[in-house]
Every structure is written in structure tokens, then in C-alpha cells.
Image (cartoon, rainbow, N blue to C red):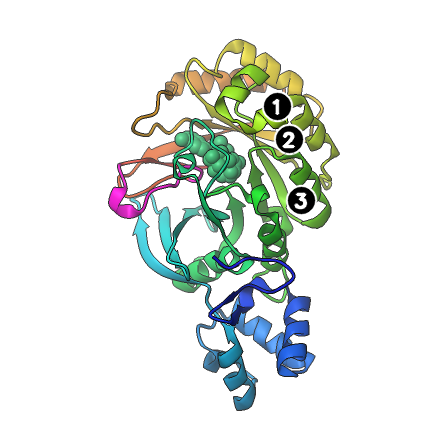
């Protein structure tokens, strides 16, 4: 798998252009191909805004530069292998990386715009007890180019349907791959390119505290945190990351996080029957969050085969929501719809042949 560091990620010696920020692209083009800044601007627009698949589709480049680019660089980092659309309009996109790994994105349609749920790793190392991706273990990090290309290829495919936001809630722990995720977030919001609003780029983490601080310092992205429990005892059991950074350390990091005016941290809370859905959990959650600029997203657990955990009833979810609202918290419930072809954000893990009727969660 291509890595992201000071050396740009490459496949077969060819640089993956969509993993470079705009200044990096300009510098690379000048130092390697002796091309002027104006060519870098045209290339940037061609790659990100026009979503070109070939250098011949990019306007204003000389034939000589096109040839040199074709030798030294590559446009696409991923290949779209399969697309499955559920009855409610959500689509799961399966991409293949250059190293043959399969990763997934989910397009979540809204009334007039869509959000893309991105993967940041192949599998995940964090081992959360409720998560399907955890069962794969970590098979590799995605490069910045592979992260950005999920949006470019989705837009290329869906054309007129505007995708105006991304959430890093697909496969992987994005803060375990910050070297790729930070530049990817910078590339996603570049106004001359993909032009997402920074308010609509959200990175979700299980709670790697030092990386939360780094994200706040280095990335324009919004923060989402998968809290999922209100005591260390339960969170230790559900999410091994809590043994290293317990709830108090995590909440302290959220207080330090630079939240811009009119923005809020998203607190995700997967409801598990009999584990974290008691009235005492409501009170503890309200106490933990009371002076934090946040909104809570309740997600009814999507059960998968072999899991010892259970999904609460809809009535139990509604009761938990209403009790939290009584504490004056902003709360939304992520509703779930069944579809045999799909998997929800945050529980991606099996290639389509193995799809086993996982329910699909929509915000
Ligand atoms: N690794 C990151 C982002 C991917 S997981 C993180 O953990 O935040 C995205 C979300 O899906 C998380 O909030 C996670 O708690 C949730 N999730 C994982 N498995 C789930 C399941 N089986 N049912 C419902 N939500 C799940
Ligand atoms: Fe990884 Fe997130 Fe799943 Fe935990 S919930 S195993 S961090 S993808």
C-alpha cells in the first residue's frame, strides 16, 4: 500500500497526484518536470474539479508536459469495482487499491445534496467489540490519494448529484492514519478543487487523545467522537482504546479541541441493549457533556452474525433520546433501514459476496 510521508505516494514509481496538496503539486511539478505554476493550476483543476481520468482531458497542458506527466505520475489511485444502490437511494461503492485491497464508501443521499462516508484504512486495529470492521484487523493504511479519490470517483460516477460533505466513518480509525488524513482533509476543502466546506468534513475517532490534539492543530476538519459508554468499566470492555485514554482524558481533549463559532463536536453513541442504555447512562452522559459545544448522535446497534450484543427496541432508543433532551442536549437518532446489499457507515467489513443482510444506517 502506498505510504504518505515527505515522499509522495507512488505506484510503480509514478506519483499519485491526488495525494498532493495544491502547494505540494506546484512544488513537485516544478522540481520534477520543470513546469511553471500556471501548469500546476491547470492540472489541479483538471484533477479535482473536472475529475479527468486521462491527461488528454486536462485543458491547457502542452503535449510535451502531458507525455512527461504520463511517465512520472498517475491520475487515479483507485478503481471503482462495484456499485450497489439500496431501495432508499443510498449506494455502496467498492473500490480496489493498487495493491488489490477492497475498500468501501457509502453515499448517503439527503434532500438536495449527498454525503459520502469515507474509509481511511483497510480494516481497523482498534478492536471495538461491537464493530464489524474490527474483525478484519488492520490490513493497511490508505494514502491521502486513496482517501481523496473516493470523493473524486464518486463525483465522477454520480455526475449531477451534488456530494457536498464527507464523514470519515467508513472502514478504519482515521486518527490512526493522520499522516494521510490531515493532507486529505486539506485537499478536500481546497476552493479551486473539490471545494467542500470545512464545516462539512467530519473526522470520527474512537478516542486517540494525542491525535485529537494534532487534528485540531493541523486540520480544518470537524470532530466526531464515538463515546458509546458513560463509565470506564463499560467503555474498557467495549473499546480497548479506553484503557489507554479513559473517558476523563477523552473529555479533556474535547474541551481543548478548537471548535469554531456555531460549530459543535459530534458525539456518537451506539446504543446496546442492557449495556449502555440505562437511565443512569443518560444522567452520566448529560453530566459529561453539559458544558461542551456538542450534539449527540444516537445509533441503534446494527447487529451482525456472531455478536453477543443486542440492539435495543425503537421505543428504548426513543426513550433514551427524550431523556437526554430533557437535559437540554441536542440529540438526533440515526435511523436504520434494512437492505441486503448494503452495510452502514462504521460497520463495513466484508466484500459484497459475503454481504449478509446488514442494515443500512441513515442520518
Ligand atoms: N473508527 C472511527 C470511524 C469509523 S466507525 C470511529 O470509531 O469513530 C463509525 C461509527 O460507527 C462509530 O461511531 C462506531 O461507534 C459506529 N459503529 C461501529 N459498529 C457499529 C454497529 N455494529 N452498529 C452501529 N454503529 C456502529
Ligand atoms: Fe475501528 Fe471505529 Fe470500528 Fe472501533 S468502531 S473498530 S475504531 S472502525
Q: Give the image location of residue 349, x and y in percent.
A: 37, 41
Residue identifier under label 1: 329
Residue identifier under label 3: 215
Image point 39% across, 19% down: which residue?
Answer: 312
Disc 2 is placed on an element classified as: strand
Q: Is mark 3 within 8 Å of ligand 1?
A: no
Residue 335 drawn above or below residue 160:
above
Disc 3 is placed on an element classified as: helix
Q: CA distance from mark 3 to mark 2?
A: 17 Å
- The verdict on residue 18 being magenta is no
Q: Give the image location of residue 207, x and y in percent.
A: 60, 33
Choose top left, top right, bottom left or bottom right for residue 156. bottom left
Image point 63% across, 20% down: which residue?
Answer: 328
Choose top left, top right, bottom left or bottom right for residue 25. bottom right
Q: CA distance from mark 2 to mark 1?
A: 8 Å
Q: CA distance from mark 3 to mark 1?
A: 25 Å
Q: Give the image location of residue 298, x and y in percent.
A: 49, 27
Of marks 3 and 2, the one in the foreground: 3
Residue identifier under label 2: 294
- Asked whether the residues under the numbered discs 3 and 1 touch, taking CB atoms below 8 Å apart as contact, a structural biologist would say no
Crowding at label 1, few (<14), some or many (≥20) Cα neighbours within 10 Å? many
Write down the region rendered in magenta.
345-356
The dominant secondary structure in magenta is loop
Disc 1 is placed on an element classified as: loop
- The verdict on residue 350 being magenta is yes
Mark 3 / mark 1, whichever is N-terminal: 3
Amino acid at each position: 500500500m502506498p505510504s504518505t510521508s515527505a515522499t509522495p505516494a507512488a505506484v510503480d514509481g509514478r506519483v499519485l497526484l491526488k495525494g498532493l496538496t495544491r502547494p505540494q503539486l506546484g512544488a513537485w511539478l516544478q522540481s520534477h518536470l520543470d513546469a511553471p505554476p500556471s501548469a500546476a493550476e491547470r492540472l489541479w483543476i483538471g484533477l479535482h474539479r473536472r475529475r479527468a481520468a486521462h491527461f488528454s482531458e486536462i485543458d491547457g497542458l502542452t503535449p510535451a508536459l502531458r507525455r512527461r506527466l504520463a511517465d512520472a505520475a498517475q491520475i487515479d489511485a483507485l478503481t471503482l469495482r462495484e456499485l450497489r444502490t439500496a431501495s432508499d437511494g443510498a449506494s455502496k461503492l467498492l473500490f480496489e487499491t493498487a495493491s488489490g485491497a477492497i475498500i468501501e464508501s457509502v453515499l448517503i443521499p439527503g434532500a438536495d445534496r449527498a454525503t459520502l462516508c469515507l474509509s481511511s484504512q483497510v480494516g481497523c486495529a482498534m478492536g471495538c467489540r461491537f464493530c464489524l470492521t474490527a474483525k478484519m484487523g488492520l490490513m493497511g493504511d490508505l494514502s491521502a490519494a486513496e482517501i481523496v479519490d473516493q470523493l473524486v470517483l464518486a463525483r465522477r460516477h454520480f455526475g449531477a448529484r451534488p456530494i457536498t460533505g464527507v464523514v470519515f466513518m467508513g472502514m478504519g480509525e482515521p486518527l490512526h492514519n493522520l499522516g494521510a488524513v490531515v493532507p486529505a482533509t486539506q485537499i478536500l476543502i481546497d476552493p479551486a478543487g473539490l471545494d467542500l466546506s470545512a464545516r462539512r468534513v467530519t473526522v470520527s475517532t474512537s478516542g486517540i487523545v494525542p491525535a485529537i490534539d494534532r487534528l485540531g492543530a493541523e486540520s480544518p476538519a470537524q470532530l466526531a467522537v464515538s463515546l458509546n459508554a458513560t463509565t470506564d468499566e463499560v467503555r474498557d470492555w467495549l473499546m480497548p482504546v479506553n484503557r489507554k485514554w479513559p473517558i476523563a482524558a477523552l473529555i479533556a481533549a474535547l474541551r481543548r479541541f478548537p471548535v469554531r463559532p456555531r460549530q459543535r463536536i459530534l458525539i456518537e453513541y451506539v446504543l446496546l441493549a442492557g449495556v449502555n442504555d440505562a437511565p443512569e447512562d443518560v444522567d452520566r452522559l448529560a453530566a459529561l457533556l453539559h458544558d461542551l459545544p456538542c450534539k449527540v448522535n444516537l445509533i441503534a446497534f446494527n447487529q451482525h452474525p456472531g455478536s453477543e450484543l443486542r440492539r435495543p427496541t425503537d421505543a428504548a432508543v426513543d426513550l433514551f433520546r427524550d431523556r437526554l433532551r430533557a437535559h437540554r442536549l441536542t440529540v438526533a437518532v440515526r435511523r436504520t433501514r434494512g437492505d441486503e446489499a448494503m452495510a452502514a457507515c462504521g460497520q463495513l467489513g466484508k466484500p459484497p459476496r459475503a454481504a449478509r443482510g446488514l442494515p443500512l444506517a441513515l442520518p
